[in-house]
């Protein structure tokens, strides 16, 4: 492991620097990054620093470490024993439910979470939020287990968690039990799965009331479908206004927004902006699941209105979502893969200078783990071999170097054989 005094001639997306930084034609800023005691001591114009003690980046792109704001650590990596039988959403639910009941012991879940976090850390993630199925015996076990893992990983990855359940639970007596478990967990959030046909004013009032009572933010699965006849998203925005909700609300997926009439889209986006709701799109998972029918080519990409939301000032983020489980068969908790494929799927490749924030600074700010490439911030950085945005998106960047607290780490993703051995 090495600890240079500075990184000279780095290229950084302007959106990840001080707003006063002036980008070059491709949205990148050439600069020298001064390091001291594990922090960024200064960011100076390129060529300012002497070569002595510094490492020359020779124009390589440097980002702050990633933030993965929507994952499912308790489901992760069960594909080998619980594959999706037909690639559909219902196939995913059925396979996951069966595996949860048969196999999700403390030992099993803990081993898969540890493996997942090892992957994320090696790839350059420094903050991560997971959703946990909060039902049955697993729901009772997962929150104490998570607090143990959260404390164990605190020096490497800042972890948060969200309760994932159905809205009716907050109308039932055990809704308070869920809220107490969440409130007892640092970085805990209330959540549930909301779609047009299961979102009632009564359930939303119970959810918002519980969040207000326990002082919790909300992180919701919303409209993970292609229903053209309306959204739960608008009802959530209306409920936020009705309750004058002061906490943060993050809505994940929001796929059906893309198939609403244009006038409805404009109205909903305006409400999201006015209520301060953030959106996290999960393009890889939704591309895999949405609009799948055997023998038929899918017509939809499964993404929400990325460009329109961003243009309106609604914060948009991307995240891993599911990894090697029935909801998404692939992935490795690699946020560079998520970013690259999001750019391709969402056609973010022209005028995309602002999008790196969607997997770094914007998501970190939303988690309250603010981290940017600026004086006084931790020197937690990712150095890519690429020297242009096009090159960055054209290869996997598996030869990246990850710096934590000013030191280049030598971590690599754990081998699948290790996971198989621990689950045998």
Image (cartoon, rainbow, N blue to C red):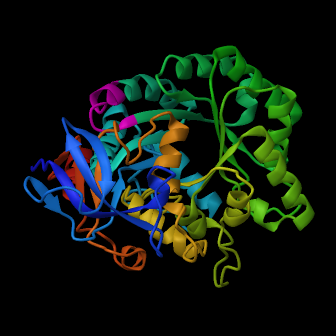
Residue at 68%, 58% in the rendered image? 310
Q: In terms of depth relative to the viewer, which is nearer, 83 or 419?
A: 419
395 on left or right of 344? left
Count of number-bearing discs:
0
Q: In terms of depth relative to the viewer, which is nearer, 180 or 240?
A: 240
Residue at 68%, 66% in the rendered image? 307
Residue 355, given in percent of the width and then of the height, sits at 53, 62
Furthest-right residue in this view: 263
Residue at 33%, 24% in the rendered image? 148
Tell me if residue 367 is in the magenta stretch. no
187 on left or right of 383? right
Asked where in the image residue 370 lies, by quadrant, the reply is top left
Residue 171, given in percent of the width and then of the height, sits at 77, 24
Residue 188, given in percent of the width and then of the height, sits at 52, 27
Considering only vertical position in the picture, is 69 above or below 240? below
Q: In terms of depth relative to the viewer, which is nearer, 227 or 27?
A: 27
Q: Which residues are magenta?
A: 148-158
Asked where in the image residue 242 lies, by quadrant, the reply is top right
Residue 39, given in percent of the width and then of the height, sits at 26, 38
Q: Is residue 329 visible?
A: no
């Amino acid at each position: 492991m090495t600890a240079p005094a500075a990184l000279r001639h780095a290229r950084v997306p302007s959106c990840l620097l001080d707003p006063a930084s002036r980008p070059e034609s491709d949205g990148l800023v050439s600069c020298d990054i001064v390091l001291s005691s594990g922090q960024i001591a200064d960011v100076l114009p390129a060529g300012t620093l002497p070569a002595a003690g510094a490492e020359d980046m020779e124009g390589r792109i440097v980002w702050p470490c990633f933030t993965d704001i929507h994952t499912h650590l308790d489901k992760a990596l069960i594909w080998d024993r619980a594959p999706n039988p037909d690639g559909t959403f219902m196939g995913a639910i059925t396979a996951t439910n069966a595996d949860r009941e048969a196999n999700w012991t403390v030992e099993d879940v803990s081993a898969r979470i540890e493996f997942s976090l090892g992957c994320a850390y090696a790839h350059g993630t420094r903050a991560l939020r997971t959703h946990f199925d909060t039902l049955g015996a697993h729901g009772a076990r997962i929150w104490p287990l998570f607090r143990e893992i959260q404390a164990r990983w605190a020096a490497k990855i800042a972890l948060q968690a969200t309760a994932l359940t159905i809205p009716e639970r907050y109308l039932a007596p055990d809704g308070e039990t869920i809220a107490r478990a969440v409130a007892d967990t640092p970085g805990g959030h209330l959540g549930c799965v909301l779609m047009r046909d299961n979102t009632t004013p009564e359930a939303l009032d119970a959810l918002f009331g519980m969040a207000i009572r326990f002082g919790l933010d909300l992180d919701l699965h919303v409209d993970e479908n292609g229903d053209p006849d309306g959204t739960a998203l608008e009802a959530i925005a209306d409920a936020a206004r009705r309750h004058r909700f002061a906490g943060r609300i993050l809505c994940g997926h929001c796929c059906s927004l893309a198939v609403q009439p244009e006038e409805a889209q404009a109205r909903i986006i305006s409400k999201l902006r006015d209520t301060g709701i953030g959106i996290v799109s999960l393009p890889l998972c939704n591309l895999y699941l949405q609009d799948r029918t055997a023998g038929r080519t899918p017509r939809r990409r499964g993404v929400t209105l990325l460009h329109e939301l961003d243009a309106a000032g609604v914060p948009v983020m991307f995240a891993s979502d599911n990894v090697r489980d029935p909801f998404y068969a692939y992935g490795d908790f690699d946020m560079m893969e998520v970013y690259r494929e999001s750019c391709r799927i969402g056609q973010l490749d022209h005028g995309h200078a602002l999008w790196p924030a969607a997997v770094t600074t914007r998501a970190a700010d939303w988690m309250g783990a603010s981290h940017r490439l600026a004086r006084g911030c931790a020197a937690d950085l990712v150095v890519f071999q690429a020297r242009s945005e096009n090159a960055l998106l054209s290869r996997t960047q598996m030869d990246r170097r990850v710096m934590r607290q000013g030191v280049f780490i030598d971590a690599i993703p754990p081998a699948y054989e290790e996971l198989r051995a621990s689950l045998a």
